[in-house]
Image (cartoon, grey):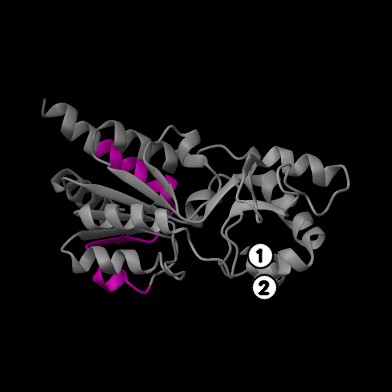
């Protein structure tokens, strides 16, 4: 346990020394709120279903019903989920003025539910629907209501185009304005904290490398190893909720004790 205590203190010191911190969060952040991740061996969603069949834009357009059945099940888990200790620790860090923004791969809205600010949703959100024709945005409930009434090609009120959840499907690009916001945060940060991401999906996997190349420090908490562990200033392979709140607690005590 001593080794973990040492790591936690070192992690806290990295935060205390930094002036502009950005967090990058992935599916491992949501698993502790009961949302299945996608890639964990044995439990990941993509071991149960083929993402090309259930999460690609081409399969959605060609068979909305098959995809919507799957998405409704996933959506219900997301809508029921509550922020966990990790989300709350990030909000606490932000209130201490030690976190500039959050880049998240998650579509679950849990950072916002935990009252974090400046959250950039790289892969969109489960709480909205978007029209593939005109780009109109609707609350996801309007799309769910159509599906539940038997309309498996939910349509836009304005142009009758097909609605889809406003999340990035396989085969779709990330939105350019979102990428610009993310680039700005990465370029300005002097410490990037990665929480619960396997860093396998691009362009997100590129952000830690970019931050390092610009002279930022890198700290990672993830259950599994990542390809960039060797280049990080701090790596902890453990649950975020077990470790990160302890890191933030030390930071809080130092900041408040120093005043």
Q: Quadrant of the C terminus?
A: top left
Residue that numbered label 1 is attached to:
55
Circles 2 and 1, Cβ within 8 Å, touching? The answer is yes
Residue that numbered label 2 is attached to:
52
Separation of marks 2 and 1 at Cα, in angstroms: 6 Å
Question: What secondary structure is found at the residue carrying circle 1?
Answer: loop
**One can see residue 189 in this view:** no
Please identify the residue farthest to the top as the structure is shown.
Answer: 259
Q: Nearer the viewer, residue 45 or 184?
A: 184
Question: What secondary structure is found at the residue carrying circle 2?
Answer: helix
Q: Residues within 10 Å of mark 1 (few under 14, many from 20)?
A: many
Query: Where in the figure is residue 67, as x and y percent of width and height?
Result: 75, 61
Q: Nearer the viewer, residue 170 or 96?
A: 170
Q: Is residue 161 magenta?
A: no
Query: Where in the figure is residue 75, as x and y percent of width and height?
Result: 68, 47
Q: Does 56 sit above or below residue 111?
A: below
Residue at (60%, 63%) from the top-left corner? 169
């Amino acid at each position: 346990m001593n080794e973990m205590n040492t790591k936690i203190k070192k992690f806290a010191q990295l935060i205390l020394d930094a002036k502009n911190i950005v967090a990058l969060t992935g599916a491992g952040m949501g698993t502790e709120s009961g949302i299945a991740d996608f890639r964990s061996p044995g439990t990941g969603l993509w071991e149960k279903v083929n993402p090309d069949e259930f999460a690609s834009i081409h399969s959605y357009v060609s068979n909305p019903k098959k995809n919507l059945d799957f998405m409704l099940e996933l959506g219900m888990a997301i809508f029921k989920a509550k922020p966990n200790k990790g989300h709350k620790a990030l909000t606490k860090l932000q209130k201490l003025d030690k976190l500039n923004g959050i880049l998240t791969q998650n579509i679950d809205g849990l950072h916002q539910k935990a009252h974090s600010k400046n959250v950039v949703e790289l892969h969109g959100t489960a709480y909205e629907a978007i029209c593939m024709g005109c780009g109109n945005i609707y609350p996801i409930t309007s799309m769910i209501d159509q599906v539940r009434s038997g309309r498996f090609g939910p349509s836009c009120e304005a142009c009758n185009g097909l609605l889809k959840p406003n999340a990035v499907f396989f085969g779709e690009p990330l939105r350019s304005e979102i990428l610009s916001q993310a680039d700005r945060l990465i370029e300005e940060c002097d410490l990037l904290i990665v929480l619960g991401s396997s860093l396998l999906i691009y362009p997100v996997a590129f952000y830690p490398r970019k931050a390092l190349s610009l002279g930022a420090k890198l700290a990672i908490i993830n259950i599994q190893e990542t390809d960039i562990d060797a280049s990080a200033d701090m790596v902890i392979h453990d649950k975020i909720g077990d470790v990160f709140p302890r890191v933030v607690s030390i930071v809080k005590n130092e900041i408040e004790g120093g005043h």
